[in-house]
Every structure is written in C-alpha cells, then in structure tokens.
Image: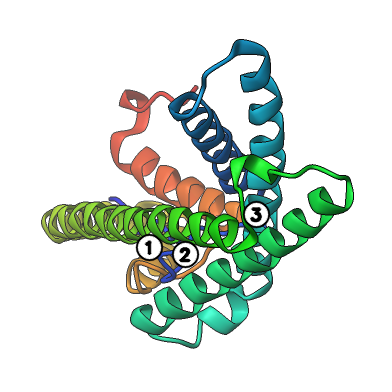
Amino acid sequence: MILPVARATDRLFIPNFCTARPVFVLVLMGELLAIVLTLSTATDVNASFDDLALKSLFIQWVTLCCAAVLCASRRLYSRLSEARVATVAYVSMLAIAWVLSELAWWTLDYLSNPMPLGAASRGGFLARNLAIAAIVMAIALRYMYVHHHWEQRIESEAEARLQALQARIRPHFFFNCMNTIASLTRSHPMLAEEAVEDLADLFRASLLPARHRVTLGGELELCRQYLRIEALRLQDRLAID
C-alpha cells in the first residue's frame, strides 16, 4: 500500500526570497549582468576593472533591495492574483532601481566623479538604468512564472500517477488484509484485533487529501503499522533491515 505524501506547495510564482538559495541565485545573476554590461563597453583593461567594480556595487544594491522588498511583501502577494502580483512586484522593483539610481548619481557627483557609471548626464543615467532594469526584471518575472507553472504541472502529473497507482493497489491490499485478519480471528484474536486497528489507521490516512501535512513521526508510525500487517501475512518471507 502506498500512502499519500503531503507536500505544501506555495501558489506564488515568485520564489521565497526570505531564504538563502533564491537570494544567492539573484546575486549571481546580478553579477553576471554587471560583467556583461562591462564587457559591452570595455575599451581598456584597467578602466574595465574600475567600471566592473562600480557596476557590480550598484547592481548588487538593486538586487539585494529587491530581494528584501519581495521577501517583506510575500504575505501581501499571497492575497493577490498572479497578474496583480506581477504588476506590483514589477513596479516595486522599478521604483527601487530609480531610487538607487538617484542615490548613486548624487553620491558619485558629490565625490567629484563627472561621469558616474559612464553617463554624461543625470537624465541619461536614469533613463539607461531604468531601461535596463525594465527589460531584465520583465525577463526575470517571466522566467519565475514559467518555471513555477512547470513545477506545478510536473507535481500534478506525479500526483495523478500516484493516485492511479493507489487506486489499483488499495483493493488488493484490503482483501489481503481481510484474509489475514480472518485467519487470525480464532487462532490469535489479539493479533487480529491489533491488525484491525492498524488497518483502520492506514485507511484513515489514505483518505486524507494528498496535500495534507503530516509529521515525520506520524509517517514513520504508519510505515510501522503497514509492516506489522505485512509481517502477519508474509511471516518469515518478510525481512526488515
């Protein structure tokens, strides 16, 4: 008998940026973007390293602030539709890019750098940064959406196959259990009673929704009950390591 395994799936297509792995991937993608942007305008090796350092610092500011906002807004997103989540997240990230672009411009201007991050004017600097942010963030959100729905489809297909397999296995297991309990009723009534109790717990668990949460201890106890029933039927033919 195969029991349904609970798995809580977040319906949000935006990853949980309150955890380390998505943030690490985001930082890595940001650094790759900084390298690409630097290589696209590189004319001198020494100047390129300085340009890469500035662009990396700025992009990582934007990246980490976006991750923090997406993490803090996760509870809000859970109450919105996917279209609204995408819109709010997109506008929020563009706003972060604009604010940090302003801060970067005035900071470098204060430090007497006449062309911060390669821009000759404040308007050009802001326009270029917002254009790059708009394109990159749109691609990122689209990738998150497609990847999330792909994972959901794979999970749904696996769950459907599991349920089809369970539909075949349950009747066979049930009749085997009934035959075993019937054979023990007169010779070993206590064992028969314990087997009935174990069988009742197993069927109660099998009727729970597939997404129902169970603890590891509860799952192990169900496994032990299943093995006790199988041990009564198979006896010496069942070996447990």
Say left or right for 73 vs 179.
right
Q: Is there CB contact under 8 Å for labels 3 and 1? A: no
Marks 1 & 2, CB-CB < 8 Å contact: no
Q: Which residue is mark 1?
A: 199
SS category of the residue bearing label 1:
helix
The residue nearer to you, when weighing 112 against 8, is 112
The answer to whether residue 175 shows anywhere in this view is yes
Q: Earlier in the sequence, mark 3 or mark 1?
A: 3
Residue 138, compared with residue 59, is above or below; it is: below
For this rendering, which residue is in front, 80 or 113? 113
- In the image, taking residue 171 as reference, residue 59 lies left or right, namely right
Disc 2 residue type (three-letter) = Ala
Q: Are marks 2 and 3 in contact (CB under 8 Å)?
A: no
In the picture of the structure, the residue carrying the numbered disc 3 is 62
Q: Position of residue 160 (x, y in %)?
A: 17, 60
Mark 2 sits on what residue? 8
Q: Is residue 73 above or below residue 117?
A: below
- Tell me if residue 64 comes above or below residue 43 in the rendering: below
Estimate the x, y position of residue 91 in percent, counting from the top left.
50, 75
Q: Estimate the spatial distance between the alpha carbons at disc 3 and disc 1, rounded to whole Å.
A: 57 Å
Q: Earlier in the sequence, mark 1 or mark 2?
A: 2
> SS for tag 3?
helix
Measured as percent of width and height from the top left, residue 40 is found at 44, 28
Tag 3 or tag 2, which sits nearer the N-term?
2
* Horizontal side, residue 51 vs residue 156: left or right: right
